[in-house]
Amino acid sequence: MTAALIDGDAVAAEVRDEVRTAVEKLAAKGVTPTLATVLMGTDPASETYVSLKQDDCEAVGIEARDVRIDGDAPADELYETVTDLNDDPSVHGVLVQQPLPDQVNDDGIVRAIDPRKDVDGFHPENLGLLMRGNARYVPCTPLGVQRLLVEADVETEGADVVVVGRSTIVGKPLANRLLARDDSGNATVTVCHSRTEDLTAKLRAADVVVAAVGVPELVDGSMIREGATVVDVGINRVERDGESMLVGDVDFESAREAAGAITPVPGGVGPMTRAMLLVNTVRAAGLVEGADVELATLD
Ligand SMILES: NC(=O)c1ccc[n+]([C@@H]2O[C@H](COP(=O)([O-])OP(=O)(O)OC[C@H]3O[C@@H](n4cnc5c(N)ncnc54)[C@H](OP(=O)(O)O)[C@@H]3O)[C@@H](O)[C@H]2O)c1
């Protein structure tokens, strides 16, 4: 079997169209959805991520504010900036780019963001709501993975889903969403990690495999049940034949021989994560302004 490709670029383009429509409806009510990105320091990868987020916003009519803080500034300066953005009624979403310099406590900053403006969905209040089954914001990568499964007509109800990785930004919130009592959930979810015994046996029993590990090509075709769906969250830069390239956590070539459907890297989950930040920002504008926003999201 050669797997069908799940095209994240195409689905992300659809999501952006939905966001554009929602932005227009908000504009008619006098609301311009606005996202403030805060970058502390000059880490080149973070600068790239922030500028992509800014571009993505502008492409759909979301206003993007680019807030920069010196990497050597005291932590208080970042806290004050976040407080000002929390208090600014024209800002609907606040995103502090991680990783942060050593003098700043990452967790403290996540908690300092007004949970109603926490478009990353990492604030404990938002993670708690997600776990209770009435999410305010679903973190962007899990939300993107779920949308890909819906678009690929992958039935999760009653399915055995194995998520490899238990991070707070991907594995755990995704497992929670897939467990939810709704049409895009109702799965039986197993979460694996570095202490899991016999990962292969667990994966081979899965109808759906999601790899969010950060280990290049850890999951290969011999670990995939014939016809299973494979979602590769991983983004790893490796050197091959003297060239730098991106690979996922799945060995694409062998996995696609076994799988029924598979996401590529790049062009799978990555563009969905970016698109879902726009969804959460428009949702934030609706929440903060008390305006109804219709978006084809999942809850
Ligand atoms: N596509 C996107 O938009 C997007 C978004 C976010 C992340 N990513 C990528 O997704 C990957 C995971 O990111 P993350 O932030 O979730 O990573 P993370 O915080 O480092 O978590 C990795 C998880 O994988 C587990 N793990 C590590 N080695 C393992 C092994 N050999 N077998 C089984 N489990 C193993 C770890 O287990 P322990 O908990 O036991 O240590 C941990 O739970 C990375 O490649 C990252 O770049 C992509």
Image (cartoon, rainbow, N blue to C red):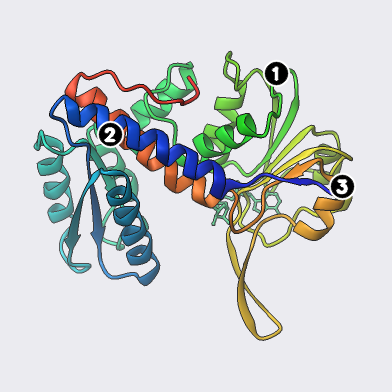
Q: Secondary structure at mark 3?
A: helix
Among numbered discs 3 and 1, the one appearing first in the sequence: 1
Q: Which residue is mark 2?
A: 23
- State the residue at coordinates (42%, 22%): 135
Res 267 quadrant in image: bottom right
User: Taking 240 as reference, is 32 above or below it?
Assistant: above
Q: Are marks 2 and 1 in contact (CB under 8 Å)?
A: no
Q: Position of residue 33 (x, y in %)?
A: 22, 37
Q: Position of residue 236 (x, y in %)?
A: 59, 64
Res 179 quadrant in image: top right
Which label number is shown at residue 116? Answer: none
Among numbered discs 2 and 3, the one appearing first in the sequence: 2
Horizontal placement of 292 versus 205: left or right? left
Amino acid type at image mark 1: Glu
Which label number is shown at residue 258? Answer: 3
Q: Position of residue 129 (x, y in %)?
A: 41, 21
Residue at far bottom of view: 242
Amino acid type at image mark 3: Ala
- State the residue at coordinates (15%, 64%): 73
Q: Which residue is mark 1?
A: 157
Q: Secondary structure at mark 1?
A: loop
Horizontal placement of 48 versus 187: left or right? left
